[in-house]
Amino acid sequence: MDSISDYELRNYQPGDEVQINDLFNAAFGRNSVFTPRTLDFWVWRYLEMPGFDPKGVFLLEKGGRIVSSVIETLRKAKLEERVFNLGVIDDVSTCPELWGRGLASKLLEESIKYAEQKNLDGLTLYADPEGHAHKIYLKYGFIDVKTFHFYIKTLSQNESLIGERKSGEKPSGGVLEPLTRENLKDYAEKFNKAHTRLEAFYPLSIDVLNWRLFASEKAFPSQTWILRSNQEIVGGGTLRIREIVAFGSKLKTALLEYMFTTKPKDAGAAKVILSKLLEEARKKDCPMALCIISSNCDFESKFLESSGFSKVSEDIQMIKPLSEFDFSRPVKHCWYTPYEHMIG
């Protein structure tokens, strides 16, 4: 059996994306539920991501073949009145025939060193609480900080959607309009301001929103709608379409992202936004809609369940503290749902 010393440790080099993407699909393709990736998606997701650092991509190679990879990206997170610099472990992939040999663990150690060299406040990742990897992360000093719930809803062409208007009925709760580059700045301000009531969230800059919502058209197209009342933005939401492989079958799935209202627990605005996203998903012949929310967002959970969504699974956000801050302290509200790490 090969030892770790038989493999070359290196960082990303131009051209590696083909092998890294194929490796991801091979490593996760055996899961009962799997979201395949295209090369265009990988290029957008990493090479075109604002602030992407190729030194954060750790690879093990032998004979010109990349057999294991760990990718760490950087972002800011706001907790209480402090903004933290965090490393995010996005992908941990190893060729299935080499599982159990410590290759991914070696790369995880390199990613921790990288985060320490960057003087980051912490290193975070997302894991299946019942999975084998969760136990490994605990051994490396990661702690559980937040649970995220996955909600799904089956869509029928004949179903009446929540908040759907009858023929001839005037819109209530505001006017919907598509997000454009012209109104993006106003949208970003309202989006971030709406989340200041949460004790932990990821502020989204104009650069990140441009990348996430506009630069992704070729790899990961999206549609975002703004809800206005008296000319003021009172909420919004994004719809994406992804192909998910579930138990051997391909499902065209509507992903509902970045839903927010500027007023807390604004059920009226939430109904209008959700109805629009589900209406557009149904037009695109999606049999299923998926949404992810933090476990302690009680209003959002009850709202989704009253709209026909069911909780099907969960992921754990884990953090390895690299500063004096006590990340184990209970957070009253939630970490903002990190779609680009849990789905993207």
Image (cartoon, rainbow, N blue to C red):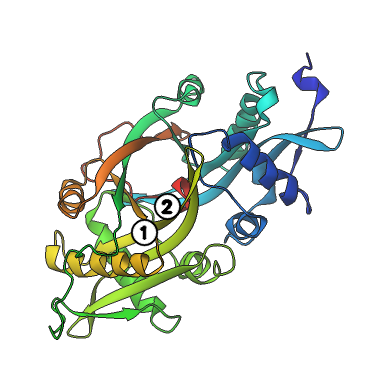
Q: Is residue 188 left or right of residue 114?
A: left
Q: Which residue is mark 2?
A: 339
Residue at the image position 34 percent from the left and 34 percent from the top: 145
Looking at the rendered structure, the secondary structure element under dot 2 is: helix
Q: Is residue 123 above or below residue 54?
A: above
Drawn side of residue 153 relative to residue 48, left or right: left
Q: Amino acid at mark 1?
A: Glu
Name which of mark 2 and mark 1 comes first in the sequence: 1
Query: Percent x, y for residue 94?
Result: 65, 31
| Residue 75 makes an appearance in the image | yes
Looking at the image, the residue that sits furthest to the right is 63
Q: Give the vertical position of 60 relative to 253 (above or below).
A: above
The location of residue 210, given as percent across then percent down, is: 50, 70
Residue in the image at 51% along x and 43% along y = 88
Placement of the N terminus among the 4 image quadrants? top right
Depth check: give the residue in front, 170 or 99.
170
Farthest-out residue, front? 158
Quadrant hosting residue 289: bottom left
Which residue bears the numbered disc 1? 257
- Where does the image place residue 224, in percent across and percent down from the top left? 38, 71
Alpha carbon distance from label 2 to label 1:
7 Å
SS assignment at label 1: strand
Q: 10 Å neighbourhood of mark 1: few (<14), some, or many (≥20)?
A: many
Say if mark 2 contacts mark 1, CB within 8 Å. Answer: yes
Residue 44, given in percent of the width and then of the height, sits at 61, 60
- Relative vertical location of residue 343 with respect to residue 239 in this rendering, above or below: above
Identity, as a three-letter code, of the amino acid under mark 2 = Tyr
Residue placed most toward the observer, 261 or 273: 273
